[in-house]
C-alpha cells in the first residue's frame, strides 16, 4: 500500500481473505440456483434411468457419476501440484497441472457432449439428446445449473493454463506462489459447488418421465 | 412447494456457517499444524541442496501432504459411491449428511480454509 | 488530441469496438450454423436481433474495461510481468485533473470518481423525474405518452438506485481507509476495476431507454419483463454489471477494515461510519448475487427459451417433452431477497454519517457508541429475513404473511436504537448549525417520516390497502432521502474542505438546506396524501374525480424546488469554492484521524503511522486523546487480527 510495497506475506494474507469472501459471494449465486431447483422441481427431477446410450447401453444415470468422479480426481491432482510447488518440484508441478487440465476438459466434454447432447440434425447443431433447455422447468434449471458451473470450469481451466505457463518459466518459489494457491482453491471451489449440484440435479427426488415416452 | 423453498434458502446459510465454524474449531483442536511445521523446519535444516529442478526429494513433510491427498480422495470417492446408492433407496436426509461431509473434506484439506485464520505465514 | 488519450475516451472507443464484435459474433455464428440472421422476423429493428444485441452488450463492457485500462496490470501479471505499484499520476506529465478520467489506484481519486459519477447519475434520474412529474401535475394530461412514461419511471428508479450505489461506494472508498488510518485499500487495482465497471453499466442503463425502453418499473417482474421491449435486456445487463461492482467493492472494504486498521484501533474504537460501511459491505457482498441471478434468469428465458418463470411452457419449443412448470413468484422471492437488504444498504452508510457528524457539531460524546455499532450489524442481518413483506399480495402462500410481518416489525428495534442515540447525543449539546449539521438534522426529520410510514406497510391488514399506491412511493422516497440523499449531501459539505482545502460558501449552503428540506416535506407528505386518496403507482395519469389535483401540483412544484436547490449546491461547490477561503486542516475541530493531516491531504495520507490511544467520540472531555502519530520510523504492523480479538 505504501510506495514501499507491503511484504509478500501480508499481501498474501489479504488476498486469501479476499478470495474466500469472493467464494462466499459466489455461494449465494450457486445457492440461488439451488433455491430455484428446489422451488421449481421440489421432490422431483427429470428421470434418466431408462434412457440408454451407446453400443453398451449404458444408463444415462451413470454418466453424471462418471464425470463427477473425473472432477474429484482433478481436484486431487491440483492438490498434488500445489504440494509440488511448495517443495520446489517443478516437474511434478507441471505434470500435475496438465493432468488437472485434462480431467477438467473431460468433465467439460462430458457435460457438453453427453449431458447437453450436442448433435447435428439436418446439418444444424441442436441441443438435447436427453433434454433441451426449452423443456419447461426441467430443461431450464438443468441447463442453468450445469451451464453456470461449466462457465466456472472454463475460467478455472484458463487460470490453470496461466499458472502452468508461469510455473514453466520459473515464476513460483516455495515461499512465493500465491498464484498457484489461488488457482488451486478456485479449482477446488468449482469442485465443491459440484458436490452440491450433482445430487441436486441427478439424485435427489423422484425421477419424472418425459410425456413423450 | 413454498415450505421446501424456505428450508433450502436457509440451508446454504446454515451449512456454510456450520462448515466455517467447524473448520475453525478443527484448527483449534488439531495438533497437526504445529507438528508439521516443526517437521518442515527439521527437514529444511537437514540441508537439502538449494532450489532447483532436481530438488524433488521427498521430505517427510511432503510425504505427509501427499498421503493426506490420497486419503481425502479415497474418502471423497467412497462417499460419492455411497451417495449414488443411497439415491436408489431414496434417503434424502442421509444424502445431505454426505454432501456436508464431502464439502467439509474439500474445504479443510484441499482449500486449507484454516489458513484464512492464520496470521503469520506458516507453510 | 490529449483528450483522445484519456482512459474514459479510450474506454468508450473500446466499448464500441466490443459491441460491434459481439454483434458480429452472434450474427456470424448464426449464419455459419445455417440459421437466418434475424432471430425473430416478426419484429423490426434491433429487436429482431435480440440475442446478438445482448451478447454485444456484454462485449461492450469487456471492450470498455480493456480500453480504459482497468485490466492492463492483471493481463501483464498473467504473462508474468510484474507491475510496480506507486501512487501519483499513473501517466507522467498529465495534469491532476486527468487522473479522474484515467484508471487511478489511489482510493482518494477513486472515491471522488465514485461520488461524482453518482451525482451525475442522480442528476440524470432526477431530470427524468422532473419530466414525468409534469405529466402528473394535473389530472388527465397528455404531455408524456404512456409508453414513454413507463420507460421513464422505470429508468428513473434504476438510475437513481445506481446513483445511490455509486454514492455509497464513494463514501466508503474515500472515508474507510482515511478513518482507519490506512494509506489505501487492500486491493487498489480491484478498487479501480470496481469503479470503472460502473461506467459501462450505467451507459447500458441509459442506452436501454433508447433501444425500445421497457415498461416494468425498476422491479422487472416477469411475466411482464419476459415480454417487455428490447430495452429491458440492457436494463438487466446494466444492473448486473453495477452489481458486480458492488460485490468486488464490498469485498475490498471488508478486507481493508479487517486487516489494515491502525495500531490500537480495536473494533470498538473504529469510527461508527466504518461500522456501517462494514455492515453495508456484508449485504452487498452476498445479497447482490440474487438480483444478478434473477435478472439473468429472465434474460435467458427471453433469448434461450429457458422457462424458469413461464408456467405455460416456452412458445417455440419443438419437443413438447417436459413443457411448462415455471413460476413467476420465484422471481419475486429472489428479487426481494436482494432488494430488501438493498434498501438497508442504501441507508446504512447515511445513518453512519449522521452518527458521525452529530457529536462533532454538538460537541458531546456520541450517545451509546456500542449500541450504534451493533445496531448497524443487526439491521443488516435482520434485513435478510423480511423480504416477503413486498409480496403480501403476490399470491405466495398465505401462511407466510404473518411471519414476515413480524420479522419486518422487528427491524424497527435497531432503527429505534439509532434514533434514541441521536436524540441522546443532541440532548444538552451546544449545537453549531453549520450546513453539514443542518443536513444531518434534516436527514433525521425526513427519515422519521419514512420510518413511521413503514410499519403500516409491514402490517398485512393495512398493506393490503396501501400496496401499489403512491403511499409506498412516499414511504420509500422519505427513507431514501432521509437515509441517503440528505446524509450524502451532509458528507459532501463536511468533507469538501478536507478534499479540496477550500471552504464552500456557508450562506449558499444554508440556502440550499432551507429550500430543500421544507420542499421535501411537502413532496413526501403530498405523495403519502395522494396515495391514501387513491392515486396508484406507475400509472401515467389519473381521473379528475379523485380530487387530488392540488396535492399533485404541490408535489411537482416541490420536486422542482428540490432540483433547483441541488443546482445551487453544484454552483457552490464546483464554481464558487474555487475561490473560497482556505479551510485549514481541521475546520470542524473533529477528533477523526483524517482531520489531523493537512487539507488537501498529501498523496500518502499518513506518512507517520497513527496510533489510536483513546475513544473516538469523547468530545468535550478534557484531556482525552483519540490518536497520536508515531515517529515516522519503522512501520508498525497492524495488530488487528481477522478474528478481531481485542
Ligand atoms: C421501519 C422500517 C420499514 C418498514 C417496516 C418498511 C416496510 C415496507 C413495506 C412493507 C414495503 C412494501 C410496500 C408494498 O409494496 O406494499 C416497503 C416498500 C419499500 N420500502 Fe420500506 N420499510 C421500512 C424502511 C425502509 C427503509 C429504511 C428503506 C430504505 C430506503 C425502505 C425502502 C423501501 C422501498 C424502496 C420500497 C418500495 C419497493 C417497491 O418498489 O415496491 N423502507 N417498505
Ligand atoms: Cu422491504
Image: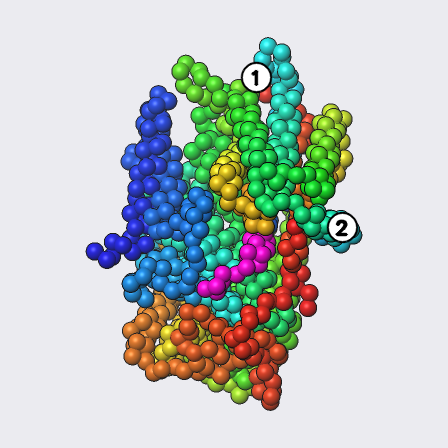
Q: State the residue at coordinates (42%, 74%).
A: C601
Q: Which numbered dot is residue A212?
A: 1
| Label 2 neighbour load within 10 Å: few <14, some 14-19, many 20+ | few
The image shows residue C501 at horizontal and vertical percentages of 38, 77
User: How did the renderer colour the structure?
Assistant: rainbow
Extreme left residue here? C1
Please tell me whether residue C33 belongs to the stretch shown in magenta: no
**Residue C386 at least partly seen:** no
Q: In this view, does A169 lie above or below A108?
A: below
Q: State the residue at coordinates (45%, 21%).
A: A126
The image shows residue B76 at horizontal and vertical percentages of 71, 34
Picture quadrant of residue C448? bottom right
Q: Do the residues labelled 1 and 2 touch (CB within 8 Å)?
A: no
Q: Do labels 1 and 2 share a chain?
A: no
Would you say B28 lies left or right of C613 here?
A: right
Nearest to the observer: residue C376 or residue C130? C376
Q: Which numbered dot is residue B35?
A: 2
Which SS does the magenta portion mostly show? helix
Residue span colored magenta: A1-18
Q: State the residue at coordinates (39%, 41%).
A: C58
Identify the subunit bearing mark 2: B
Please tell me whether residue A12 belongs to the stretch shown in magenta: yes
Amino acid at each position: 500500500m505504501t510506495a514501499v510495497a507491503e511484504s509478500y506475506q501480508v499481501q498474501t494474507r489479504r488476498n486469501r481473505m479476499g478470495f474466500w469472501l469472493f467464494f462466499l459471494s459466489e455461494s449465494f449465486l450457486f445457492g440461488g440456483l439451488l433455491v430455484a431447483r428446489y422451488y421449481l422441481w421440489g421432490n422431483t427431477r427429470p428421470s434418466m434411468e431408462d434412457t440408454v446410450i451407446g453400443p453398451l447401453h449404458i444408463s444415462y444415470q451413470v454418466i453424471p457419476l462418471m464425470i463427477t468422479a473425473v472432477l474429484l480426481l482433478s481436484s486431487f491432482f491440483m492438490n498434488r501440484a500445489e504440494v509440488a510447488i511448495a517443495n520446489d518440484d517443478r516437474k511434478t508441478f507441471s505434470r500435475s497441472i496438465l493432468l488437472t487440465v485434462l480431467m477438467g476438459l473431460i468433465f467439460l466434454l462430458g457435460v457438453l457432449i453427453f449431458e447437453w447432447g450436442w448433435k447435428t440434425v439436418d446439418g444444424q447443431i441442436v441441443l438435447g439428446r436427453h433434454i433441451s433447455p426449452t423443456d419447461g422447468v426441467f430443461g431450464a434449471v438443468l441447463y442453468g445449473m450445469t451451464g453456470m458451473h461449466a462457465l466456472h470450469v472454463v475460467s478455472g481451466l484458463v487460470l490453470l493454463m496461466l499458472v502452468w505457463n508461469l510455473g514453466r518459466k520459473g515464476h513460483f518459489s516455495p515461499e512465493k506462489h500465491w498464484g498457484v494457491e489461488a488457482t488451486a482453491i478456485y479449482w477446488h471451489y468449482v469442485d465443491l459447488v459440484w458436490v452440491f449440484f450433482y445430487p441436486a440435479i441427478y439424485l435427489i427426488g423422484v425421477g419424472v418421465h418425459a410425456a413423450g415416452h | 412447494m413454498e415450505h421446501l423453498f424456505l428450508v433450502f434458502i436457509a440451508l446454504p446459510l446454515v451449512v456454510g456457517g456450520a462448515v466455517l465454524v467447524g473448520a475453525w474449531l478443527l484448527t483449534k483442536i488439531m495438533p497437526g499444524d504445529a507438528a508439521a511445521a516443526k517437521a518442515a523446519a527439521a527437514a529444511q535444516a537437514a540441508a537439502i541442496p538449494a532450489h532447483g529442478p532436481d530438488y524433488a526429494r521427498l521430505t517427510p513433510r511432503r510425504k505427509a501432504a501427499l498421503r493426506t491427498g490420497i486419503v481425502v480422495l479415497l474418502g471423497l470417492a467412497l462417499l460419492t459411491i455411497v451417495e449414488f446408492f443411497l439415491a436408489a433407496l431414496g434417503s434424502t436426509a442421509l444424502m445431505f449428511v454426505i454432501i456436508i461431509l464431502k464439502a467439509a473434506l474439500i474445504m479443510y484439506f484441499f482449500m486449507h480454509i484454516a489458513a484464512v485464520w492464520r496470521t503469520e505465514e506458516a507453510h | 488530441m490529449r483528450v483522445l488519450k484519456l482512459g474514459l475516451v479510450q474506454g468508450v472507443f473500446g466499448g464500441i469496438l466490443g459491441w460491434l464484435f459481439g454483434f458480429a459474433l452472434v450474427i456470424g455464428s448464426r449464419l455459419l450454423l445455417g440459421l437466418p440472421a434475424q432471430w425473430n422476423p416478426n419484429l423490426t429493428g434491433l429487436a429482431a436481433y435480440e440475442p446478438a444485441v445482448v451478447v454485444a452488450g456484454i462485449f461492450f463492457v469487456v471492450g470498455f474495461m480493456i480500453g480504459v485500462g482497468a485490466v492492463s496490470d492483471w493481463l501483464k501479471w498473467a504473462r508474468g510481468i510484474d507491475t510496480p505499484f506507486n501512487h501519483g499520476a499513473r501517466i507522467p506529465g498529465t495534469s491532476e485533473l486527468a487522473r479522474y478520467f484515467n484508471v487511478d489506484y489511489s482510493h482518494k481519486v477513486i472515491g471522488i470518481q465514485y461520488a461524482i459519477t453518482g451525482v451525475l447519475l442522480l442528476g440524470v434520474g432526477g431530470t427524468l423525474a422532473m419530466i414525468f412529474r409534469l405529466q402528473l401535475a394535473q389530472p388527465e394530461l397528455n404531455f408524456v405518452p404512456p409508453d414513454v412514461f413507463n420507460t421513464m419511471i422505470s429508468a428513473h428508479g434504476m438510475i437513481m438506485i445506481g446513483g445511490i450505489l455509486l454514492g455509497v461506494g464513494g463514501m466508503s472508498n474515500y472515508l474507510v481507509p482515511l478513518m482507519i488510518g490506512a494509506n489505501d485499500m487492500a486491493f487498489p487495482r480491484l478498487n479501480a476495476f470496481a469503479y470503472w465497471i460502473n461506467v459501462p453499466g450505467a451507459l447500458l442503463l441509459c442506452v436501454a431507454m433508447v433501444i425500445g425502453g421497457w415498461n416494468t418499473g425498476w422491479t422487472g417482474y416477469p411475466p411482464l419483463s419476459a415480454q417487455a421491449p428490447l430495452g429491458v435486456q440492457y436494463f438487466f445487463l446494466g444492473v448486473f454489471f453495477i452489481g458486480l461492482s458492488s460485490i468486488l467493492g464490498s469485498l475490498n472494504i471488508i478486507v481493508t477494515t479487517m486487516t489494515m486498521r491502525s495500531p490500537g484501533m480495536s473494533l470498538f474504537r473504529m469510527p461508527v461510519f466504518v461500522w456501517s460501511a462494514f455492515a453495508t459491505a456484508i449485504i452487498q457482498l452476498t445479497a447482490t448475487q440474487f438480483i444478478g441471478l434473477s435478472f439473468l434468469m429472465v434474460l435467458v428465458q427471453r433469448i434461450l427459451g429457458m422457462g424458469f418463470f413461464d408456467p405455460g411452457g416456452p412458445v417455440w419449443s419443438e419437443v413438447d417433452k417436459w413443457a411448462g412448470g415455471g413460476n413467476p413468484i420465484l422471481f419475486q422471492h429472489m428479487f426481494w431477497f436482494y432488494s430488501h437488504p438493498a434498501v438497508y444498504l442504501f441507508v446504512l452508510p447515511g445513518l453512519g454519517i449522521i452518527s458521525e457528524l452529530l457529536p462533532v457539531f454538538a460537541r458531546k460524546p456520541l450517545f451509546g457508541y456500542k449500541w450504534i455499532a451493533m445496531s448497524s450489524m443487526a439491521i443488516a442481518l435482520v434485513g435478510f429475513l423480511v423480504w416477503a413483506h413486498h409480496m403480501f399480495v403476490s399470491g405466495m402462500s398465505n401462511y407466510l404473511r404473518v411471519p414476515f410481518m413480524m420479522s419486518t416489525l422487528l427491524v424497527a428495534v435497531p432503527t429505534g436504537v439509532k434514533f434514541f442515540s441521536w436524540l441522546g447525543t443532541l440532548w444538552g449539546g451546544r449545537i453549531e448549525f453549520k450546513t453539514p449539521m443542518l443536513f444531518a438534522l434534516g436527514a433525521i426529520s425526513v427519515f422519521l417520516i419514512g420510518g413511521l410510514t413503514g410499519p403500516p406497510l409491514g402490517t398485512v391488514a393495512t398493506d393490503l390497502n396501501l400496496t401499489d399506491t403512491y403511499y409506498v412511493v412516499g414511504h420509500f422516497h422519505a427513507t431514501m432521502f432521509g437515509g441517503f440523499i440528505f446524509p450524502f449531501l451532509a458528507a459532501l459539505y463536511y468533507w469538501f474542505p478536507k478534499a479540496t482545502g477550500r471552504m464552500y460558501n456557508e450562506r449558499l449552503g444554508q440556502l440550499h438546506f432551507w429550500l430543500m428540506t421544507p420542499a421535501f416535506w411537502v413532496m413526501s407528505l403530498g405523495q403519502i396524501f395522494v396515495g391514501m386518496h387513491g392515486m396508484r403507482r406507475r400509472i401515467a395519469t389519473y381521473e379528475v374525480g379523485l380530487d387530488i389535483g392540488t396535492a399533485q401540483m404541490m408535489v411537482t412544484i416541490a420536486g422542482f424546488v428540490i432540483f433547483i436547490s441541488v443546482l445551487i449546491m453544484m454552483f457552490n461547490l464546483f464554481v464558487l469554492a474555487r475561490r473560497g477561503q482556505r479551510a485549514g486542516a481541521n475546520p470542524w475541530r473533529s477528533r477523526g484521524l483524517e482531520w489531523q493531516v493537512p487539507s488537501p491531504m498529501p498523496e500518502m495520507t499518513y506518512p507517520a503511522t497513527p496510533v489510536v490511544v483513546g475513544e473516538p467520540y469523547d468530545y468535550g472531555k478534557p484531556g482525552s486523546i483519540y490518536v497520536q502519530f508515531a515517529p515516522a520510523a519503522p512501520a508498525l504492523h497492524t495488530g488487528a487480527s481477522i478474528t478481531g480479538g481485542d
